[in-house]
Image (tube, rainbow, N blue to C red):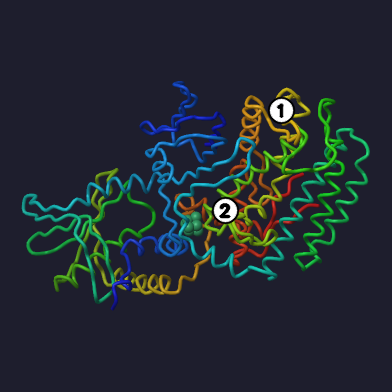
Amino acid sequence: MGTVYISTDDTFIGKTDERLRVRAQKETLLDVPLIKVDGVVILGRATVSPAALIELLERKIPLSFMTGTGRFLGRLEPELNKNIFVRSAQWQAAGETDRSIHAVQGFIRGKLKNYRSTLLRAQREGIDGLEAGITRLEQATNPINQTSIIDALRGLEWAGSAAYFGHFGRLIRNGDFSFKTRCRRPPTDPVNALLSFGYALLGHDVQGAINIVGFDPYLGYLHTQRYGRPSLALDLMEEFRPLVVDAMVLSAINRKALTPSDFADEPVSHAVSLTDEGRRKFLRLYEQKKQSKFKHPVMGRQCTYQEAFEIQARLLAKYLMSETEQYPPLVLR
Amino acid sequence: MIEADYIPIAALNQYAYCPHRCWRMFCAGEFIDNQYTLEGTGLHDRVHTLGSNHREETWQVRAIWLKSDRYGLIGKSDLIEETDGQLCPVEYKRGHRGEFDNDELQVCAQALCLEDMTQTTITQGFVYYAQSHQRQPVEISPALREDAIATITAVRTLLHTGTMPPPVYTKRCRGCSLYAQCLPQAATKVGRYKETL
Ligand code: SF4
């Protein structure tokens, strides 16, 4: 099971028997049984055959379109899950309600606790100068459960993220790379380019999980409605950012799986992006990360991150539908 | 009674197996095929091809609609047989006879429809288990009828209100195709969970 990423321009995506076949310039780049595919992401330009489109819809496999640099363009979504009970519970909790506040507390607490674990782990591995960041993260995390105004929670999230990214550069142990501050749109250094690209891929996956469970992706609690923004996916993504993207970006750099030659920068704007080869490497690493296993602290069993996206979405649905007393964000040590 | 008030016979079987499962399938519309249901459907495709024929002294008709105004039931039969003027519903199942007797309920509901449609009394039905090629006779006893009628009422309430019966973790969950959607142990596990710092 996995997501198929198509990052070569001008490919043709077709279907032969029960298989998805990707071709470019008369060469077959990929030929996989559809049963093993749970998502398709096209980065750049591609043609999809009508037969393949119908097959993807019937098998409820989402197809996302992104630019070569990972900016999300749109998505072909299989028929929406018919579970109106989930959507209605989601809408009932909209605004500043007890449930939305609890959920937002969970998303932020999950993210900041996972940030803290990242710094603590680095500290155990011998990196100095992280104490201030850890302390500030704790100061942002401690009041979360006592804070019941969503804007104030956004403030804590901001403070915690600033503390973390203020120290993120120290986690890089490869002289070829450095990180000063988080910058997006466009990223102007390789590390930021990787983070942005990784978050875009994560967004695709979390949105897929949210759709399977039956949520309305556009109604969020932390990220409130703005037209065309999958707010709930952004909400549920928070706890996964450090666990999936930051962790794999750091390991790719520190283990030298990516080198400066995997990046190119534009003249004038200095926007940095991955080369074709670099992007292929990154996609492979991201997929590996998603398929890596860990023990889910609540469910008490092994699962992959890919499965965890759906488990967390289901746990959120259960909380909103009053099946459970709390929403437990995924917090890993 | 309006058309929408008719209860699908298949829902009774699911309800008897697990009310939460019935809610997921018939209220929330979460019918996800897994290997079992797919195999089951394949079997039903064959069974559900309209046709009638004679087998020795028995007249058989396949895949006809069954409906009861009296009980507000609707569904499709796999096979109806007639021997010496006595009608008898036969329900096809993949695999062998399970530990749970919800299949009998379904046969009984078909019998109730047949009685209503033909003004006769049905005394017996069968469940045919494809894997063991065995026919299990089902006596349409007063106790089974009562059970079926009570289930019809419960399912009608469920479909009308849409109120979710909570999932209850039992050994049936192991064979349930909706396990990954339902996560029946989640409420207990979340309740016990203490987040670490
Ligand atoms: S997993 Fe168990 S509780 Fe959930 S629907 Fe199936 S049988 Fe019912």
Q: Which of B136 and B87 is in front in this view?
A: B87
Residue A97 location, x and y as percent? 68, 71
Q: Residue at x 77, y 68 (%)?
A: A148
Which residue is label 2 attached to?
A210
Decide: is A60 above or below B13.
above
Which residue is label 1 attached to?
A264
Alpha-carbon distance for marks 1 and 2? Answer: 34 Å
Q: Which residue is drawn at 82% across and 25% down?
A: A176
Answer with left or right where residue A211 lies relative to residue B57.
right
Answer with left or right where residue B97 lies relative to residue B81.
right
Q: Nearer the viewer, residue B31 or A198?
A: A198
Query: Where the N terminus of chain B falls, by quadrant?
Result: bottom left
Q: Residue at x 58, y 40 (%)?
A: A66
* SS for callout 2: helix
Circle 2: residue type: Ile
> Disc 2 is attached to a residue of which chain?
A
Pointer 1 or 2: first along the chain: 2
Circle 1: residue type: Ala
Residues beneath discs 1 and 2 located on the same chain = yes
> Disc 1 is attached to a residue of which chain?
A
